[in-house]
C-alpha cells in the first residue's frame, strides 16, 4: 500500500469525483501499474485535458499538466519531443479524447509517439452533467439526447489501431486487475499506447438511463464485456451488443521521437553548428 | 566588404529567434508565414533543437506550451486563420504563465480572406483575441531588420515576464527582401527565465502581488509541480476563492503594465516641430515615412510616430508628442483598429483622422501625402 | 537616386530569382536594395511580378510607384503592366507583338529565343533577361552581377547561368547599338 500511496499527493485528497464513479478505480490501476514498474516519480509527466477524468493528475505526485479541452495529447507531444527521456502519460475522457481531441488522438497514433494514453470512458460528459459523447452507445439517453442517441459511437480500440497505435488494450473498472496489467504493458511499449478504461458514471449515465447503482453499473459493464481470447471462438451473433476486453493489439514499430533524434544526429554530423545570422533561405524559383 | 545581406522578413524573424535561443518550434503551414516553419525545420535539428509540424494550429501552440514547460525556448508562426485557432491556448499560456512567442504574419481576413495580400486586421485580435482579461505583449516590426530584432526581443520579454508575446508582422514585411546588417550576436543580451534553485519549498506561483513574476521550474527536474488553466493559488492547484482570483488576475495584467517602460520601443521622424502627426506601424509605416518625407520636402511640418511595441502602447511617449500636434492621421490596413487607441490617448486635444485601406494592397505614399496636405477624406 | 524595376512574366519563369540577384548585386556595390513580389496563385503559372528598388539613399517605400524599367516576358504582362508605364522604359521579349496604345519607350529583345537557341536551355531566360535589364539600365557592373549570379544559382549550373548572363549583356549592347542608329 505505501508503495502506491507515495505516488499520490495525499494532501490533495479526497478527490472531487462523485460517489460510485469509476475514475478512482482506473486511476488506482494506473498507479499500481506505475508502482509495479517502479517508475521514478521525477521522470514521469501526467497530462490531461478537461472533464472529470482530467482532474486525476492533480492527485498524482508527478509533474502534472491540466491543459485545455481535447488538447492533452498535443501538449504531451511537445513535452515528449522536448524530453524523450521522460515517461509521458495522458489521462483523458471519452469526450475529451474522441470528440474535441479526436484529431490530436489520430495524429499522435499515426506518429507512434511514445505516450501512454488512458481513456477513462464513462460514455458521457459528466463534468457538464450528462450530455451524449461520441462514445455513448446508440439509443441511450443523455441530456442532449432526450429521445435516445441517434448517432453511432466509435469503437475506440479499432480507431486507435487503424490510426497507427502500437499497443491497444481495453478493460472495464470491473476488470480492475486486467486494467492494471494492460496499463503496465502499455507503459512498457515504446510507442503510442492506448488503454480504454470503460467505467461507470452512476450520477449521469446511470441515472439518466436507469442503470441503477454503481454496483449495478459494474455488472452492466461486466455483462457486456467479452475477453478477446474467448471472443475468438464465439459465433458473431453471440457478440452482438458486446465489446472486447483484453490486449487487442501489440505490434512494436519505430517510435517518433527516436526517429527524430536519429535524423537530427545524422544532420548534425553533416553540418557544423549554427553560428547565427550567417545563412540564407533556400531559394525557390517563384 | 560589408556584412550586408539581402534578407527576407520571415527569414530575419527566424534568425532573430535562433539568436535568442529558440530550440523548439511547432507549426502548421499557412501563407504568408510558412518560410518561418521551413527554415526552423532546416535549422533546429542541427543545434539539438526540435521541429514538429502539428496537425493544426491548436496543436501547434499546445505543443510549444508543453515544450516550454520542459525549459525550452519556443515559438510558433501563423497567419490570421491559424491565429484565430490559437486563441484558447494563448489564454492558457497567459494564465499558466508559460513563455511562448507567436509570430502572426497578417493577411487579409476575415476567414480565408486573401492569403497572399497584406493586412493589419489583427491589431485588436492580438490584444483581445482570447476570452477573459489576460496579459499579452505585441511587437510590430516595421522593416526586415526589425523582424530580427523584435523577434529576439519577444523571447526576452516572454522569458522575463512569463507572458505570451506576439510578433505582429504582415505579408509585405514577411516577404520583402531588404539589405540588412545583422547585429554581432556576441553583443546581444539574452534573457532567460528565472528558475528556482531547489524543489524544497517551491511554490510555482508564488509572486509579489504588484506584478511579480514567479520562478519557473522545469518538468522532469524533480519539482513535481502542477500546472493548470484553472485559477490557482501559489501552489499551482485550482482555487475558487474570490480573493485569490481577484489578486491573481490583477497580478497577471500588472506584470505587463509594470514592464511597459522597460519594453517600450518606437521610432519617430521629424516629430520635434510637427503640426501633423502620422501614426502608423508595420508596412503602413513605410508608406507613411515616405509620405512624411515628401511633405517635409514641400515645407509641410509632418512627422511620423511608429510604435514597435503596440500592446502595451507606449502611451507616455506618444502623449508627449501628440500634445503639440494640430492633426493626427492614422493610416492602417483595416477599417480602424489602432486608431481607437490613438483617439483614446489624444482625446479632444486634436482631431484624429482615420485613413483606412482594405483592398489587399499596401498604401501608396501619395495616398497618405494627399491626406497630410488636407486632401479628400 | 531611386531606381525602380518591375520584372513581369508568368509564374515559373524565375523572375523572382532574377529580382533577388539584381538586388544582391546592388548590395555588393554598397547600394541599398529592396525586393518585393506579387505572390500567390501566380507562382503556379499565372501572371507574375517581382519588383526591385535600388538607391544610394535610404529606401522608405518598398514598392515601385513609377518604374524606371519594366521587363515583360509575356504578352499578358506587357499588356497589364505596360499600360501603367509613365516615364520608364519597357523591355519586352520579341515574341510579344507591340501595342500602339502603350506609349512608353519600348525596346524589344529576343530573350526567350536566345535562352532556348543560343544557350539551349529555356530555364535560363530569367538570367538572360537580367543581363538585358542590367545592360540597358547600367545599374550594376557586369562583374558584380556575375558574382551575384554565382552566389544564388544552384551548384553546378554556374557556367550555364553565366553564359546566359553574358548573352543578356550582348543583347543589350545590340539593341543599344540599334537605338543609336
Image (spheres, rainbow, N blue to C red):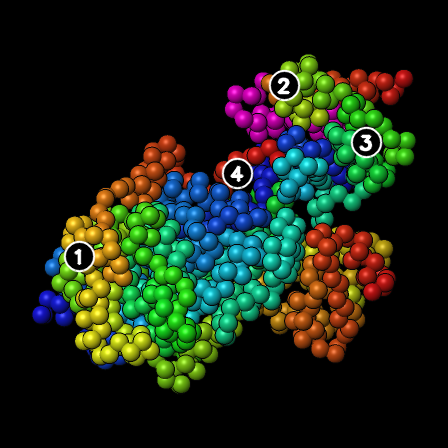
Secondary structure of residue under mark 2: loop
- Local packing at callout 2 (Cα closer than 10 Å; few below 14, some 14-19, many 20+) is some
Is residue A201 rendered magenta in the image?
Answer: no
B202 left or right, relative to B188: left
Residue visible at 69% across and 56% down?
B284
Q: Mark 2–mark 3 contact, CB under 8 Å?
A: no
Label for residue A281? 4
CA distance separating discs 3 and 4: 31 Å
Mark toward the start of the polypeptide (2 vs 3)? 3
State which mark lies toward you, 2 or 3: 2
| In the depicted structure, whether residue B122 falls above or below residue B25 | below
Quarter residue A63 falls in: bottom left
Is disc 3 on the same chain as disc 2? yes
Q: Nearer the viewer, residue C127 or B251?
A: C127
Give coordinates of residue C21: x percent, y percent: 63, 31
C149 left or right, relative to B87: right
Is disc 4 on the same chain as disc 1? yes
Q: Nearer the viewer, residue B307 or B122?
A: B122
Point out the stretch of residues depicted in magenta: C130-159
State which mark lies toward you, 2 or 4: 2
- Local packing at callout 4 (Cα closer than 10 Å; few below 14, some 14-19, many 20+) is some
Label for residue C90? 3
What is the chain identity of the residue bearing mark 3?
C
The quadrant of the image that shows the C terminus of chain A is top right
CA distance separating discs 2 and 4: 25 Å
Secondary structure of residue under mark 3: strand
Q: Mark 3–mark 1 contact, CB under 8 Å?
A: no
Which SS does the magenta portion mostly show?
helix
Quarter residue B354 falls in: bottom right
* Mark 1, residue position: A227
* Mark 2, residue position: C121
| In the depicted structure, whether residue A251 falls above or below residue C22 | below
Amino acid at each position: 500500500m505505501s508503495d502506491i500511496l507515495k505516488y499520490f499527493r495525499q494532501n490533495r485528497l479526497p478527490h472531487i469525483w462523485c460517489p460510485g464513479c469509476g475514475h478512482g478505480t482506473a486511476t488506482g490501476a494506473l498507479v499500481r501499474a506505475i508502482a509495479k514498474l517502479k517508475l521514478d516519480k521525477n521522470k514521469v509527466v501526467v497530462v490531461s485535458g478537461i472533464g472529470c477524468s482530467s482532474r486525476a493528475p492533480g492527485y498524482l505526485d508527478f509533474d502534472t499538466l491540466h491543459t485545455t479541452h481535447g488538447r492533452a495529447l498535443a501538449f504531451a507531444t511537445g513535452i515528449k519531443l522536448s524530453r524523450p527521456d521522460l515517461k509521458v502519460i495522458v489521462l483523458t475522457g471519452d469526450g475529451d479524447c474522441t470528440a474535441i481531441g479526436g484529431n490530436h488522438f489520430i495524429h499522435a497514433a499515426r506518429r507512434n509517439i511514445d505516450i501512454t494514453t488512458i481513456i477513462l470512458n464513462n460514455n458521457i460528459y459528466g463534468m457538464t452533467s450528462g450530455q451524449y459523447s461520441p462514445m455513448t452507445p446508440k439509443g441511450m439517453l443523455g441530456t442532449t439526447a432526450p429521445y435516445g442517441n441517434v448517432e453511432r459511437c466509435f469503437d475506440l480500440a479499432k480507431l486507435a489501431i487503424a490510426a497507427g497505435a502500437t499497443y491497444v488494450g481495453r478493460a472495464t473498472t470491473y476488470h480492475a486487475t486486467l486494467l492494471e496489467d494492460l496499463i503496465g504493458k502499455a507503459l512498457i511499449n515504446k510507442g503510442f499506447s492506448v488503454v480504454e478504461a470503460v467505467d461507470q458514471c452512476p450520477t449521469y449515465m446511470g441515472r439518466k438511463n436507469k442503470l441503477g447503482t454503481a454496483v449495478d453499473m459494474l455488472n452492466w459493464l461486466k455483462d457486456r464485456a467479452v475477453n478477446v481470447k474467448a471472443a475468438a471462438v464465439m459465433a458473431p451473433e453471440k457478440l452482438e451488443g458486446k465489446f472486447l476486453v483484453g490486449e487487442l493489439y501489440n505490434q512494436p514499430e519505430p517510435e517518433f521521437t527516436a526517429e527524430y533524434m536519429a535524423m537530427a544526429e545524422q544532420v548534425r554530423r553533416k553540418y557544423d553548428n549554427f553560428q547565427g545570422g550567417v545563412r540564407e533561405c533556400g531559394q525557390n524559383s517563384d | 566588404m560589408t556584412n550586408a545581406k539581402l534578407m527576407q522578413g520571415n527569414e530575419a524573424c527566424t534568425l532573430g529567434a535562433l539568436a535568442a535561443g529558440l530550440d523548439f518550434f511547432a507549426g502548421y503551414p499557412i501563407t504568408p508565414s510558412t518560410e518561418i516553419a521551413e527554415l526552423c525545420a532546416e535549422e533546429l535539428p542541427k543545434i539539438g533543437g526540435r521541429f514538429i509540424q502539428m496537425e493544426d494550429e491548436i496543436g501547434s501552440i499546445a505543443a510549444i506550451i508543453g515544450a516550454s514547460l520542459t525549459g525550452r525556448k519556443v515559438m510558433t508562426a501563423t497567419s490570421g486563420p491559424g491565429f484565430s485557432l490559437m486563441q484558447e491556448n494563448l489564454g492558457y499560456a497567459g494564465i499558466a504563465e508559460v513563455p511562448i512567442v507567436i509570430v502572426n504574419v497578417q493577411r487579409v481576413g476575415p476567414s480565408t480572406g486573401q492569403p497572399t495580400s497584406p493586412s493589419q486586421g489583427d491589431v485588436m485580435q492580438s490584444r483581445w483575441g482570447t476570452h477573459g482579461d489576460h496579459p499579452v505583449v505585441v511587437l510590430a516590426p516595421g522593416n526586415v531588420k526589425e523582424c530580427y530584432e523584435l523577434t529576439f526581443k519577444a523571447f526576452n520579454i516572454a522569458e522575463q515576464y512569463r507572458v505570451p508575446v506576439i510578433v505582429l508582422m504582415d505579408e509585405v514585411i514577411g516577404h520583402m527582401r531588404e539589405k540588412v546588417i545583422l547585429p554581432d550576436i556576441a553583443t546581444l543580451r539574452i534573457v532567460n527565465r528565472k528558475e528556482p534553485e531547489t524543489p524544497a519549498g517551491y511554490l510555482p506561483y508564488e509572486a509579489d502581488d504588484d506584478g511579480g513574476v514567479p520562478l519557473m521550474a522545469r518538468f522532469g527536474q524533480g519539482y513535481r509541480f502542477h500546472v493548470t488553466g484553472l485559477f490557482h493559488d501559489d501552489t499551482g492547484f485550482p482555487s475558487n476563492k474570490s480573493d485569490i482570483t481577484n489578486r491573481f488576475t490583477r497580478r497577471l495584467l500588472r506584470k505587463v503594465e509594470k514592464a511597459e517602460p522597460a519594453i517600450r520601443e518606437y521610432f519617430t521622424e521629424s516629430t520635434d516641430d510637427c503640426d501633423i502627426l502620422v501614426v502608423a506601424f508595420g508596412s503602413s509605416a513605410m508608406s507613411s515615412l515616405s509620405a512624411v518625407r515628401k511633405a517635409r520636402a514641400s515645407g509641410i511640418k509632418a512627422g511620423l510616430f511608429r510604435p514597435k511595441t503596440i500592446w502595451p502602447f507606449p502611451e507616455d511617449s506618444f502623449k508627449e508628442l501628440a500634445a503639440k500636434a494640430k492633426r493626427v492621421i492614422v493610416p492602417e490596413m483595416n477599417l480602424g483598429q489602432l486608431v481607437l487607441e490613438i483617439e483614446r490617448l489624444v482625446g479632444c486635444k486634436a482631431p484624429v483622422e482615420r485613413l483606412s485601406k482594405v483592398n489587399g494592397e499596401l498604401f501608396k505614399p501619395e495616398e497618405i501625402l494627399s491626406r497630410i496636405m488636407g486632401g479628400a477624406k | 537616386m531611386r531606381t525602380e524595376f518591375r520584372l513581369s512574366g508568368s509564374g515559373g519563369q524565375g523572375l523572382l530569382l532574377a529580382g533577388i540577384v539584381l538586388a544582391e548585386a546592388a548590395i555588393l556595390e554598397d547600394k541599398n536594395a529592396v525586393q518585393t513580389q506579387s505572390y500567390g496563385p501566380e507562382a503556379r503559372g499565372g501572371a507574375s511580378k517581382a519588383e526591385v528598388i535600388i538607391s544610394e539613399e535610404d529606401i522608405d517605400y518598398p514598392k515601385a510607384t513609377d518604374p524606371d524599367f519594366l521587363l515583360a516576358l509575356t504578352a499578358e504582362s506587357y499588356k497589364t503592366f505596360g499600360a501603367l508605364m509613365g516615364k520608364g522604359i519597357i523591355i519586352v521579349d520579341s515574341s510579344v507583338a507591340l501595342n500602339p496604345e502603350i506609349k512608353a519607350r519600348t525596346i524589344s529583345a529576343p530573350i526567350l529565343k536566345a535562352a532556348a537557341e543560343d544557350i539551349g536551355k529555356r530555364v535560363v531566360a530569367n538570367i538572360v533577361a537580367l543581363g538585358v535589364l542590367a545592360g540597358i539600365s547600367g545599374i550594376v557592373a557586369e562583374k558584380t552581377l556575375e558574382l551575384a549570379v554565382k552566389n544564388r544559382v544552384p551548384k553546378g549550373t554556374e557556367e550555364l547561368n553565366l553564359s546566359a548572363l553574358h548573352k543578356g549583356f550582348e543583347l543589350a549592347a545590340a539593341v543599344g547599338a540599334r537605338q543609336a542608329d
